[in-house]
């Protein structure tokens, strides 16, 4: 154990879930209740530890608080790799978020996956995930970050394909992993660029290297973008966003944990960590990617009917927000949104899970296996039937739509403020502002669309309604917790002003100056100033757009004043595009994957059928042919005409040509003479 | 040294002569069916001769019979080699079924005479002697090749052999005559200087004679393009004789070739000084190199096509002649040494291979590849031995064949970049040769179902097989004795002038 | 007239004739006779050289040996040919090809 | 025993072989156990060697020397250093496992195990011999057993595969022989590899043959010889065939060790004896490595025969090692003397060799397991196996993830090191090569999906789960893979010093700036 209690705690936090993973993998099936209690126990302890860390952080209330501990992983005199932990406020908050949501998932799943074939496996993988996610959080260097990064990918792969009998699940899992790998390649190239110039991996050394200019200029930009590509993969930013919606094939609690709250946020977390090495150019790219993704994903979410798909796209869009914040320099706001979003988005997913659960049972009763339990068009009027789910979901929805008194409002506002100030500094990038506010409005719209379609009105199959029941405690409990945590107060303390941008969070997480040697890069202070000034205008605007969105959907789906169908018709092609996610998967298939597979076939064909069969075996064949010919020449002596010719000149046709067949002595003798002559000639030359 | 003095050092050969006569006489008293017993006489005589040679090993390096016979370790080496080969072949013959229905007394006697002839070949330093020796050996082998009187192919073999042999020895003789005319002497060591002293007017004559003579020797060692008799004769003759022809006379041929060319066309004071072209119109090294490459390549290529293992081995023996020729161009001690060492290794592996072919002939009455199918399972000993021989002939360590090849390559490489291409040719050729050697193994093990019944050859046969197989492996791991023997034998006799 | 050249020319002609016979004759005996011609052309050379190349008898000796050898060779060869004739009922070397594959 | 440890390791299998040959052919169990015992003892000795190994030096240890053929200065010399040590241990492990993998062999059991043990000696001999002649002899000794093992116990195309392997290798080794002879004569007629390492470059400096730099000529000859074994791109076509046709255990040894012989030779001979030429050839090597990576991956992607897929993955994986080896020149002056990169590359390369040894061995064993049950290897012919054989598919998943270089499994560390090392020198090549990582993942995951996920294929509903013997063969490898993935130092500490020696040799030349 090290001398530092925080490090000890984080070590425990890191490895407890791993232990549960190992136990469950090897002995899970044999344990009572398939050993879910192992996982739950582990995660609860983890949670306790992170809470205690969190509390002590609050007690210390020290912005610059940070502990680091590392050990030498590889040490070949010159080539060294140090791995280690970095514990600062960001880490602690992140740890809390992860272990909180994770433990919620553990609890929620006890009922949601009751009696599942691979129940213990499921808990094992949850353990693996928590382990690797905490690894990402605690890493103090790029290498271990990368390692846990991929491990997270694996656990998501395993959990998405939990029901691998469904081809769609298997496909989704593969897709998720490969899409992430694309990002990871960028990540690794970034690492290599940094290592080849700075010669180190730990954040601090890398920043030092950036500061003393041993890496800079284009190289640094590319390094930054490379790393960011990794973030894009994990946080499913455009154009690598395709995997997240499909990942919904996994069990809903998993979607809540990984594909809403934590794992996908890893990209954002990483960008926050390495923010100080982004060059202005890099940041611009980041900002645009984020902004565009936010708007783009939201525009898809509008038209989706699968309740989880809606949430998935909203997740993508929210992540876009966070990335946008990083890009505009207000990366603290981004991180803030990460935290709040984790809470309410997880909550939303659990709610959807609870709804689906209810639907499932109802349909099961009806022996109805045609109706899709996730399609919102089959829902409606659940409000009365499942009050808890309804209220919690409403709260979460209000939060995500950025309504005051709720956490989402604070963080979103901070981001928009950041964007606004950025745009005021660089008017040429006004598009980012459009993205930000536009997305805000659309979000509000489709989230309420979801609420109305699910809980209000009535389902197209009325008889369903009477079989819809509230979910069991184990499932509602997490809802309540997370809904509660979506209230503003938890983030503004010690202040209680619901619209101020102050609070422990802002106090403890202070932005860092960029280390990049660049004249027109804004200092952290400047950014903060800008954000502060943009605070109220941004708030006003955001309230306005949120209100618009909510109102619109109220008209459309509650009052039914406006017919959604009519609008759909009006915006024909737009609607199609959105409904079909802009045909991204199709095009990737058509222009990326298929060509590669074709190429592979071609290469294999060349390798096997052409190169080997003709070129390599060609040697054999040629040898064989030559040997055949020589064999003939040699054994059958020289060609008949020669002998024949000699015979004729000799005027001796006696026995005629027939007899001059091969194998004749004279041919040999003639050949000897020929040989002699040849050598003579050879010599005289 | 005068003739009478010479006789004193000549008694191994005298013993041999007595043996032969004894054999002839003894054979008179045997009934046809057991005239095979003559073998023991000859065998005994040969062993006596070997002992005699061993005792005479430390006799001075000298020339006998007024400078027409050399008495030197070089000759001694080859004599031993020849005796070894002969003994083995005689034992083989005693197991051969081809000879069953013939009276084999003379057969062994003829072999004895052939040994005598080869003794002369390896030690003669006078053109007359060379010619006589070669003729003795040839005539004996004509008869032996055609020994199966009622077997057509054997007849044909002998006819081809006789005409071919007579023809090429005639050509050689003509070459001799020209050489004699140019120098007025028949003593090899007088010819050399005489030629060296000549002006370039006689170049063409020299060239002509040289080539004619080469034809004569080439025929003995079956080097391309003087090899055409080989396949037919080898296939037609009784297998033991084929084995014999592929080893002993070839060795003798190399001996005389080395001696003749180094004495006549080399600088006269030392063989080791290398072949100095008597004039720039005679690029000896390159001619020999080219001949070597052509020989090995052709031998290998044609061998691939063969369906009969015996015939395949015939061609492969041509290829091996090619390998050995690689050692001559630089006429360095390494080169000659390599050839000698190779001959030792070759003795075991080639005789072994032929012996197994003979054995398979008797058991499966066939010598084609198909006859070998599944052999490895049916006769494990034979299979393993044959595998060893094949790998050794291919030249894969740890077998004798590899060591032999190794020495040859080493000699070539040592001579410097000029001859690297020769080494490459040799290397590629040994890859090609794998093609057909492995084919035997393939038939023995991979093709043909494995029989559960195991056939173990007779005691004597097994011993003989092992006696050939074990050295083939052992010499591949530890060959120092041979190497030393060879290096000690690189001493040539020169007449005191 | 009694110059070395003339002898050499004769022997060369003999040699050529011998070669020609060997190459073109189909009859085994004839081929052997061709060989004999070659041998004798060589003999002629030896003698000529010995006669004109100064008092050196090795030429003559050589010739003698060659004659003996030729005789022996011929004996063996003829035996073989006879044997062939017994088996093939022909001494036409073309027809003696049991070894053709 | 103490000072002849290496000899024991080399010759124990031969003793075992003799023992096996003495057992009558129908006592197949006795034969198997004897073989297992021989391999086991060898393994124990190898571990002893591991324990005795002195980490502080990169030079040769446990040195043994004895006269063999004085007339040619051929000696029997053995020695071990950080390069050969891991290879020897790997060999011992894989042969021990291989014996049990081939437990089910029923055709000509005796011959099979005898040849296996002979092969063992050949391989270990190559790794340990310090006399070039001895090296070559051992190198060739491997040919015969391989020919028979593939040709007699292999699949339908076994004969073709066997002869192809044989010819390919022989071409390589005859060229090698010529190169060896050239070195022999240029280095004062000695086969002592250490002496040659010292004298080769000075003696060959400035020598030209037919206008070519003698050093380069020799280098290329040797390179071809070794490249065929690795196999480097244009010389690779024997591999898929041989791997697919060979019986499981032999595929394991082929992929696990024989391929390493090539890479080992490159480092031991080309790098250590002719470092000058390394400078001239490194670029080409990096490119060849790149081609291996991409070409192998694409071919693997296209396969429908799982064994062939694994075979091509070997080509792809050895590509990383080549790239890593090329990185050695990073330490040179003109490359900014980036010693760290050189270390990363070279150590990474050797580590990659070892890891590929364990991982591909696992993969082949696993393929063998399913083949024994389903009697076919068509990827598309399976499906949903994860439901019927969960344990098996779990292990396969592990192996596949190891193969696609998942962090925390050993493959990742070595690949990463190769890349990190080569990056400063061959930026573009490495960047393109990283695509290999993606393709790796693609073909492994795709294969995994097709075989194990999706609807269960009724045909294989009740395939027997992987059994104890098979687990016994897999688990050691799996453990190694995981341990070294989490903490590679225990491996790297053995090789580090030796790699430094090699780097220094190359750098010393490089800084002479005499070359190119």
Image (cartoon, rainbow, N blue to C red):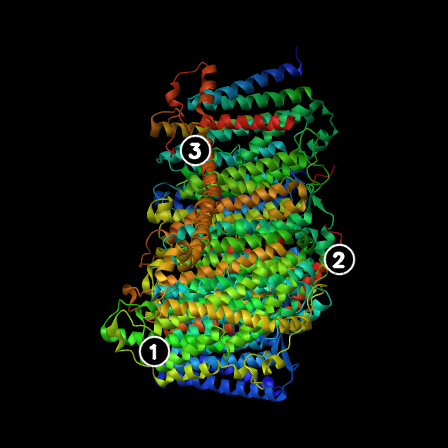
Judge depth for marks 3 and 2 and give the one in front.
2
Q: Is the C-beta separation of discs 3 and 2 under 8 Å?
A: no
Closest to the camera, between mark 1 and mark 2, is: 1
Both labels 1 and 3 in a single chain = no
Q: Residue at x 48, y 15 (%)?
A: A649
> Do we see residue A375 in this rendering?
no
- Image coordinates of residue A239 in percent, x first then y, are 50, 59
Q: Which residue is mark 2?
A: D511
Q: Residues within 10 Å of mark 2 (few under 14, many from 20)?
A: some
Within-10-Å neighbours for mark 3: few <14, some 14–19, many 20+? many
Please rate how many residues cluster around mark 1, counting C-alpha atoms within 10 Å: few if below 14, some from 14 to 19, many from 20: some
Quick one: SS at disc 3? helix
Give the number of the mark in front: 1 or 3. 1
Q: Position of residue A245 (x, y in %)?
A: 42, 65
Mark 3 on the same chain as mark 2:
no
Q: Which mark is residue B158?
A: 3
> Quick check: D137 above or below A71?
above
The residue singled out by tag 1 in the image is A383
> Which residue appears farthest toward the front when viewing the image?
A561
Estimate the spatial distance between the alpha carbons at disc 3 and disc 2, rounded to whole Å.
71 Å
Q: Secondary structure at mark 1?
A: helix
Disc 1 versus disc 2: distance between alpha carbons?
Answer: 80 Å
- The answer to whether residue A377 is left or right of residue A513 is left
Q: Disc 1 is attached to a residue of which chain?
A: A
Q: Position of residue A488 (x, y in %)?
A: 52, 81
Asked which secondary structure carries label 2, the reply is helix
In screen coordinates, is A681 left or right of D186? Answer: left
């Amino acid at each position: 154990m090290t001398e530092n209690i925080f490090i000890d705690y984080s070590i425990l936090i890191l490895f407890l879930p791993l232990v549960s993973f190992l136990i469950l993998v090897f002995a899970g099936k044999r344990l009572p209740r398939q050993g879910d209690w192992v996982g739950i126990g582990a995660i609860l302890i983890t949670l306790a530890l992170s809470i205690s860390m969190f509390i002590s952080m609050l007690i210390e209330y020290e912005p610059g608080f940070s502990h680091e501990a590392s050990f030498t992983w590889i040490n070949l005199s010159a080539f060294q790799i140090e791995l280690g932990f970095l514990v600062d406020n960001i880490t602690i908050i992140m740890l809390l978020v992860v272990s909180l949501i994770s433990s919620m998932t553990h609890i929620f799943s006890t009922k949601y996956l009751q009696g599942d074939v691979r129940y213990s496996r499921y808990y094992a993988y949850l353990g693996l995930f928590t382990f690797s996610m905490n690894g990402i959080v605690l890493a103090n260097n790029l290498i271990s970050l990368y390692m846990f990064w991929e491990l997270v990918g694996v656990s998501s792969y395993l959990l998405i394909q939990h029901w691998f009998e469904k081809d769609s699940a298997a496909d989704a899992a593969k897709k998720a992993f490969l899409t992430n790998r694309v990002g990871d390649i960028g990540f690794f190239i970034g690492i290599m660029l940094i290592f080849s110039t700075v010669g180190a991996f730990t954040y601090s050394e890398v920043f030092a290297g950036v500061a003393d200019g041993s890496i800079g200029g284009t190289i640094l930009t590319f390094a930054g973008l490379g790393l960011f590509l990794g973030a894009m993969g994990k946080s499913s930013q455009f154009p690598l966003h395709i995997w997240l919606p499909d990942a919904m094939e996994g069990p809903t609690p998993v979607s809540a944990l990984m594909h809403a709250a934590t794992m996908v946020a890893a990209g954002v977390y990483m960008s926050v960590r390495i923010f100080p090495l982004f060059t202005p150019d890099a940041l611009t790219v980041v900002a645009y990617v984020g902004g565009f993704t936010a708007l783009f994903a939201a525009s898809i979410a509008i038209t989706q009917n699968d309740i989880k798909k809606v949430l998935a796209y909203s997740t993508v869009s929210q992540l876009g927000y966070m990335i946008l914040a990083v890009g505009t320099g207000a990366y603290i706001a981004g991180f803030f949104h990460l935290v709040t979003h984790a809470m309410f988005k997880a909550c939303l997913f659990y709610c959807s899970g609870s709804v689906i659960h209810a639907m499932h049972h109802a349909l099961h009763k009806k022996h109805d296996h045609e109706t899709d339990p996730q399609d919102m068009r089959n829902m409606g009027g659940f409000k009365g039937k499942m009050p808890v789910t309804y209220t919690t979901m409403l709260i979460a929805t209000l939060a995500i739509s950025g309504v005051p008194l709720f956490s989402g409002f604070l963080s979103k506002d901070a981001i928009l403020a950041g964007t606004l100030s950025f745009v005021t500094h660089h008017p040429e990038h006004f598009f980012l502002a459009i993205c930000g506010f536009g997305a805000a409005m659309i979000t509000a719209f489709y989230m309420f669309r979801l609420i109305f379609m699910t809980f209000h009105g009535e389902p197209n199959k009325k008889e369903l309604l009477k079989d819809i029941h509230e979910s069991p405690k184990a499932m509602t409990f997490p809802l309540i917790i997370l809904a509660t945590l979506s209230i503003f107060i938890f983030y503004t303390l010690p202040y209680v002003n619901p619209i101020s941008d102050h609070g422990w969070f802002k106090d403890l997480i202070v932005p860092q100056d960029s280390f990049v040697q660049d004249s027109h890069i804004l200092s952290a202070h400047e950014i903060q100033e800008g954000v502060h000034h943009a605070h109220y205008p941004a708030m006003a605007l955001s309230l306005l757009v949120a209100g618009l969105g909510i109102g619109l959907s109220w008209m459309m789906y509650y009052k039914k004043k406006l017919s959604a169908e009519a609008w759909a018709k009006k915006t024909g092609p737009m609607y199609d595009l959105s409904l079909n996610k802009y045909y991204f998967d199709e095009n990737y298939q058509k222009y990326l994957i298929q060509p590669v597979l074709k190429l592979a076939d071609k290469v294999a064909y060349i390798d096997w059928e052409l190169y080997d069969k003709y070129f390599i075996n060609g040697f054999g064949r040629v040898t064989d042919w030559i040997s055949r010919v020589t064999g003939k020449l040699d054994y059958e002596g020289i060609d008949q005409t020669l002998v024949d010719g000699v015979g004729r000149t000799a005027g001796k046709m006696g026995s005629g040509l027939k007899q001059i067949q091969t194998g004749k002595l004279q041919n040999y003798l003639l050949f000897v003479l020929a040989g002699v002559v040849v050598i003579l000639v050879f010599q005289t030359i | 040294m005068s003739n009478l003095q010479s006789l004193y050092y000549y008694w191994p050969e005298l013993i041999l002569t007595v043996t032969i006569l004894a054999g002839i006489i003894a054979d008179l008293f045997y009934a046809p069916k057991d005239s095979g017993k003559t073998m023991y006489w000859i065998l005994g005589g040969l062993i006596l001769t070997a002992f005699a040679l061993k005792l005479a090993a430390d006799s001075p390096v000298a020339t006998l019979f007024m400078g027409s016979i050399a008495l030197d370790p070089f000759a001694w080496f080859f004599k031993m080699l020849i005796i070894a080969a002969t003994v083995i072949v005689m034992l083989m013959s005693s197991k051969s079924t081809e000879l069953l229905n013939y009276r084999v007394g003379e057969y062994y006697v003829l072999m004895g005479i052939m040994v005598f002839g080869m003794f002369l070949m390896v030690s003669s330093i006078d053109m007359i002697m060379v010619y006589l020796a070669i003729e003795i050996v040839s005539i004996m082998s004509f008869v032996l090749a055609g020994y199966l009187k009622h077997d057509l192919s054997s007849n044909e073999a002998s006819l081809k052999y006789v005409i071919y042999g007579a023809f090429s020895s005639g050509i050689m003789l003509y070459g001799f005559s020209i050489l004699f005319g140019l120098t007025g002497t028949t003593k090899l060591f007088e010819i050399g200087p005489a030629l060296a002293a000549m002006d370039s007017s006689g170049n063409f004559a020299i060239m002509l004679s040289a080539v004619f003579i080469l034809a004569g020797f080439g025929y003995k060692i079956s080097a391309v393009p003087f090899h055409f008799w080989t396949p037919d004769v080898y296939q037609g003759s009784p297998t033991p004789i084929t084995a014999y022809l592929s080893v002993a006379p070839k060795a003798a041929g190399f001996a005389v070739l080395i001696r003749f060319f180094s004495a006549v066309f080399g600088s006269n004071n030392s063989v080791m000084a290398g072949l100095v072209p008597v004039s720039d119109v005679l690029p000896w090294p390159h001619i020999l190199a080219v001949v070597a490459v052509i020989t090995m390549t052709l031998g290998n290529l044609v061998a691939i096509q063969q369906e009969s293992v015996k015939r395949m081995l015939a061609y492969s023996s041509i290829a091996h002649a090619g390998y050995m020729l690689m050692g001559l161009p630089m006429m360095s001690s390494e080169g000659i040494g390599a050839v000698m060492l190779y001959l030792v290794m070759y003795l075991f592996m080639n005789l072994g291979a032929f012996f197994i072919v003979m054995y398979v002939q008797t058991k499966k009455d066939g010598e084609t590849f198909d006859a070998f199918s599944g052999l490895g399972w049916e006769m494990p000993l034979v299979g393993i031995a044959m595998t060893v021989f094949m790998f050794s002939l291919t030249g894969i360590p740890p077998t004798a064949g590899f060591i032999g090849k190794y020495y040859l390559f080493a000699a070539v490489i040592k001579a410097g970049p000029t001859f690297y291409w020769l080494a490459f040719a040799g290397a590629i050729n040994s890859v090609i040769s794998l093609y057909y050697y492995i084919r035997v193994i393939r038939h023995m093990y991979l093709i043909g179902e494995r029989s559960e019944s195991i056939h173990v050859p007779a005691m004597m046969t097994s011993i003989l097989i092992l006696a050939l197989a074990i050295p083939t492996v052992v010499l591949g791991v530890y060959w120092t004795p041979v190497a030393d023997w060879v290096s000690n034998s690189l001493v040539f006799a020169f007449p005191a002038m | 007239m009694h110059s070395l050249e003339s002898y050499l020319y004769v022997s060369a002609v003999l040699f050529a004739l011998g070669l020609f016979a060997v190459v073109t004759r189909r009859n085994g005996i004839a081929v052997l006779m061709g060989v004999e011609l070659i041998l004798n052309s060589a003999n002629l050379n030896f003698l000529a050289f010995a006669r004109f190349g100064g008092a050196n008898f090795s030429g003559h000796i050589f010739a003698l040996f060659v004659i003996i050898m030729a005789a022996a060779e011929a004996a063996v060869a003829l035996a073989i040919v006879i044997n062939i004739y017994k088996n093939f009922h022909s001494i036409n070397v073309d027809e003696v090809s049991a070894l053709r594959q | 025993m103490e000072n002849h440890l290496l000899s024991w390791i080399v010759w124990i299998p031969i003793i075992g072989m003799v023992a096996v040959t003495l057992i009558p052919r129908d006592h197949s169990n006795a034969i198997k156990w004897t073989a297992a015992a021989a391999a086991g003892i060898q393994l124990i000795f190898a571990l002893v060697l591991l324990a005795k190994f002195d980490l502080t030096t990169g030079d040769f240890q446990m040195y043994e020397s004895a006269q063999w053929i004085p007339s040619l200065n051929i000696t029997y010399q053995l020695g071990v250093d950080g390069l050969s040590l891991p290879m020897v241990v790997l060999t011992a492990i894989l042969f021990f496992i291989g014996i049990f993998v081939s437990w089910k062999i029923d055709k000509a059991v005796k011959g099979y195990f005898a040849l296996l043990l002979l092969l063992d000696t050949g391989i270990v001999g190559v790794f340990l011999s310090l006399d070039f002649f001895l090296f070559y002899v051992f190198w060739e000794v491997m040919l015969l057993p391989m020919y028979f093992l593939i040709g007699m116990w292999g699949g339908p195309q076994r004969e073709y595969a066997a002869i192809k392997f044989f010819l390919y290798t022989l071409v390589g080794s005859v060229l090698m022989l010529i190169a060896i002879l050239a070195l022999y004569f240029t280095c004062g007629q000695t086969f002592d590899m250490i002496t040659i390492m010292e004298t080769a470059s000075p003696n060959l400096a400035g020598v030209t043959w037919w206008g070519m730099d003698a050093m380069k000529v020799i280098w290329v000859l040797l390179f071809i010889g070794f490249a065929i074994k690795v196999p480097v791109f244009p010389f690779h076509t024997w591999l898929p065939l041989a791997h697919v046709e060979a019986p499981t255990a032999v595929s394991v040894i082929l992929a696990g060790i024989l391929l390493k012989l090539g890479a080992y030779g490159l480092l031991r001979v080309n790098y250590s004896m002719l470092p000058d030429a390394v400078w001239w050839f490194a670029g080409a090597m990096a490119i060849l490595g790149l081609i291996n990576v991409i070409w192998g991956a694409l071919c693997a992607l296209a396969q429908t025969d799982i064994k062939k897929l694994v075979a091509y993955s070997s080509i792809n994986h050895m590509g990383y090692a080549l790239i890593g080896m090329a990185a050695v020149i990073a330490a040179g002056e003109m490359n900014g003397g980036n010693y760290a990169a050189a270390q990363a590359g070279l150590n990474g390369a050797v580590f990659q060799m070892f890891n590929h040894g364990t991982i591909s061995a696992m993969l082949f064993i696993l393929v063998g397991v399913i083949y024994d049950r389903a009697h076919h290897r068509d990827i598309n012919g399976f499906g949903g196996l994860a439901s019927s054989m969960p344990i098996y598919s779990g292990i396969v998943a592990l192996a596949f993830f190891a193969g696609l270089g998942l962090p925390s499994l050993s493959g990742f560390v070595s690949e990463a090191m190769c890349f990190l090392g080569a990056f400063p020198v061959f930026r573009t090549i490495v960047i393109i090569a990283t695509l290999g990582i993606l393709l790796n993942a693609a073909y492994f995951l795709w294969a995994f999906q097709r075989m194990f996920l999706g609807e269960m294929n009724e045909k294989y509903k009740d395939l027997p789960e992987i059994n104890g013997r098979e687990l016994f063969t897999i688990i050691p490898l799996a453990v190694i893979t995981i341990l070294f993935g989490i903490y590679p130092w225990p491996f790297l500490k053995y090789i580090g010093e030796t790699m430094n020696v090699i780097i220094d040799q190359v750098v010393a030349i490089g800084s002479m700036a005499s070359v190119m």
